[in-house]
Image (cartoon, rainbow, N blue to C red):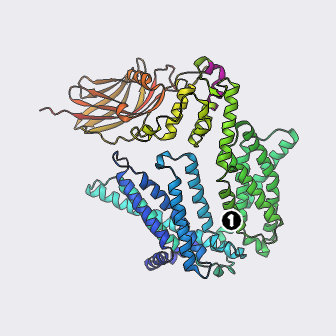
Amino acid sequence: MKLIQRLQQFSVHQVLDSAWQSIKRFPAALLAALIATGLGLYLIQVNWASDIDLAVQEKTLMMAVLAVPLFVVATLLAERHQNQKYLWGGLHIVGLLALVMYYIVLPDRPADFSEIHVKRYVFFQIMLYVLLFSVSHWDSKQSNGLWYYGFHIFIRCLTTFLFSIVLFAGLSLAFWSIDYLFGMNFDGDVYARIMVLIAGIFVPLHLLGGVPKAIEPFVKQDDYPTLFRILTQFILVPLLSFFFVILYIYLGKIVFTWDWPLGGTAYWVITYCGFAVLTFVLAYPLRLQSSFHWLRKFLTGLFVLTIPLAIVLFMAIGIRIFYYGWTENRYMVVLLGVWLVFTSLYYLFSKEKALRVIPISFVLFLFFTMWGPWGMFSVGMRSQVHLLENILQENGVLVDGKIQRIEKEQANQIGVETMDEIRSKFQYIIYHDGADQVTMWFNENIQEDTQSAQGERYRNYRYTVYQNVQRQVGFEEYYPRPIDGKMENFVSYNSETFRIQTVPDFDYSLAINGEVGLGEVTRNLAEQYIEGEKITIKAEGDFWSIQYRDETPARVNIVGFVEQLQQHYGYNEQIRSEEFSVPFESESIHGELRFRSIYSSYRGTSQEEYEVSADVYFSIRSNE
C-alpha cells in the first residue's frame, strides 16, 4: 500500500525537489555516478577499437561504480555526529584514498583480472549495499525504528526500479518508432546509451532523494505493511514449516541409516536457513504485536531448529572438502553455516535481540575472511596445491619434485576422470594467481612469453601460463573427450577477438554456424539475396562452398586448414584473427572466411568432423 500511495503522490515537482535534495546531500556520490556515466558512454562508443587501450577507462569506471555506495555510506555515517562537516570531509578523503590504493593494486588491464579480483570486487559491492540499510544507525537500540527505516529505503528502491523500467521502455520505443517511421537508422548502441544514462543519472538522483536523514521518525511507527503481513503469515511461515519437515526427515534418515549426507545437502540447508533469517527480518515488527505472540514462538523455534541443520551442513560440505579440497565456494558455505549458528545463538540467548546484528555481523564475517592466511582465497589455494601434488605423485606424473610429461598410453591408464581433475586443479590454481606455487615442478618456465601475450597477441597472462602448463604436462594433445573410456585428440580453437575489428575492402558479411567433415553429406548453411542475386553457402564434405548466382563456387578446405593449425598450435589454442582466416575467390566475388571457433563435433563418429563458427566477408566485382 505504501508503494501505491507514493505513486499517487507522484509529481514533477516532487521529482525535481528530490533530485535537488540528493545533490545537496550526496554530492560526492553523485559526482562518482556522473563520472561512471561518462565513462560508460565513452566505452560504448569506442569499445573493440583496435588502436585504443581502454584499461585505464575500464578500471576508473569500476572505481566510480564502487565509489557511489562508498560515499553514500560515508555521508550517512557523518550525519550521525555533531561535527558532521569535518567528519564528512575526513570520511570521504579516506574513502577516496582507499579507492586510489585499490586501483593501484589491481592488475593494469581488467582483462587480466583473476577470479579473486572479480570476487573481491563483488563482495565489496555487496557489503556496501548491505551497510546502506543499517550503518548510519548501527549504534541505535531502536530495532523497530531501524526496520521501518530500512523498509522506507526498500520502497524507494522499488519505486526507482519501476520508474527506470518505464522510462527505459518509453524512450526505447520512442527511438525505435522514429527509426522505423523516418528511416533514421539509429545505431543499436543507442539503447545501451539510454540504459547507461538512466542508471547513472536518474537512478541515483531519485533513489538518494528518498533516503531518510534520521531514524527517530520511524521509532514509534507501527503501521506494518499489509502485503508483508500476508507474505509472512500465509506464505513464508507455511513454506518454511514444510521445508523444515523435509530436512528433518532427511536428518532422521541420516541418523537411522548412518549414511553420510549428500554433498549438495549443504546448499539446501543454506537456502532454507537463509529464508528463515529473511522471515525473521520481515516479521520483526509483527512479532512484537500481542496478536502475533504465536509468531514470536515460531521464529524462536526456527532458530532452535537451525542449529542441528547447521551440523548436517558441516557434515555435507565436509565430505566435499575431504575429497576435493577447499575452494572459495566451499569456504563460503562453511562461513555462512558459522554465521547462521552465530545468528541463531544470538537471538536465542540475547535479551536485546537487536536487528542491526544481522547486517553488521554478515558484513564483518565476509570482510575478515577476504584477507590473510585464514581467508578463503589463501585456504583454497593451499588446499588445491596440496591435493594436486598428491594426485600427481600417486599417478607417477610428479617424480622427485618434477613433472613428467604424460604420454597417450599413460593418460589412458590414469583415466578420463583423474585427467580431468588434474587439469581442472591446474586451471583453478593458475586462474587464481597461484602459478608461483607450482612453477618449481616444471623443467621449463611456465611463465615465459607473458609479455608478448599481454602486448602484441592480446592474450592475458594467466591464459598463456595455462597453455604452457598444458603443453608441458601433455594436455594439449589429449584434450578430454571420452571415447570408449579412453583419451582421444579433441580440437578446440578460438579467435582471440570474437568481434572483427577492421575488415578492409569488403562490402558484405554473413555470420555462419555449421559443420564440416561430413563425408558425402551436403548441407545448406545460408542463403541470402545480395543486390537481387542469390548467394549460397554449403557444407560439402571437407569444404565450405560459397556460390554467387549459378557460377562455379569458391571452395574452402576447412579440414585441411585444421590440419595446418594442428601442426602450428597443437589441438587447443586461441588464435589471432589474422591467422584464423582463409581467403576465397570465384568469378564474381572475393573475400575471407574468418573463423570465430572450430571444435571437434561431439555428435560425429569421425575425428575429422568439426563444428565451425565463422564470419564470411566478401565483395562483388563490378561487371564493367
Q: State the image coordinates of residue 3 (x, y, percent, origin top left).
A: 56, 71
Q: Main secondary structure of the magenta part?
A: helix
State the quadrant of the N terminus.
bottom right
> Is residue 117 positioned above or below 469 on the image?
below
Q: Is residue 414 magenta?
A: yes
What type is the residue that disc 1 sits on?
Ile
> Is residue 333 positioned above or below 457 on the image?
below
**Residue placed most toward the observer, 392 or 501:** 392
Q: State the image coordinates of residue 445 (x, y, percent, origin top left).
A: 53, 32
**Residue placed most toward the observer, 587 or 468:** 468
Q: Is residue 530 magenta?
A: no
SS of the residue under disc 1: helix
For disc 1, the marked residue is 360
Q: How dense is the environment of label 1, judged by Cα within 10 Å: few (below 14), some, or many (20 and up)? A: some
Q: Quadrant of residue 506?
A: top left
Q: State the image coordinates of residue 12 (x, y, percent, origin top left).
A: 43, 77
**Residue placed most toward the observer, 364 or 314:** 364
Q: State the image coordinates of residue 162 (x, y, percent, origin top left).
A: 50, 65
State the quadrant of the C terminus.
top left
Q: Quadrant of residue 559?
A: top left
- Range drawn in magenta: 410-421
> Residue at 79% of width from left, 51% of height from top?
309
| Residue 499 seen | yes
**Residue placed most toward the observer, 183 or 50:** 50
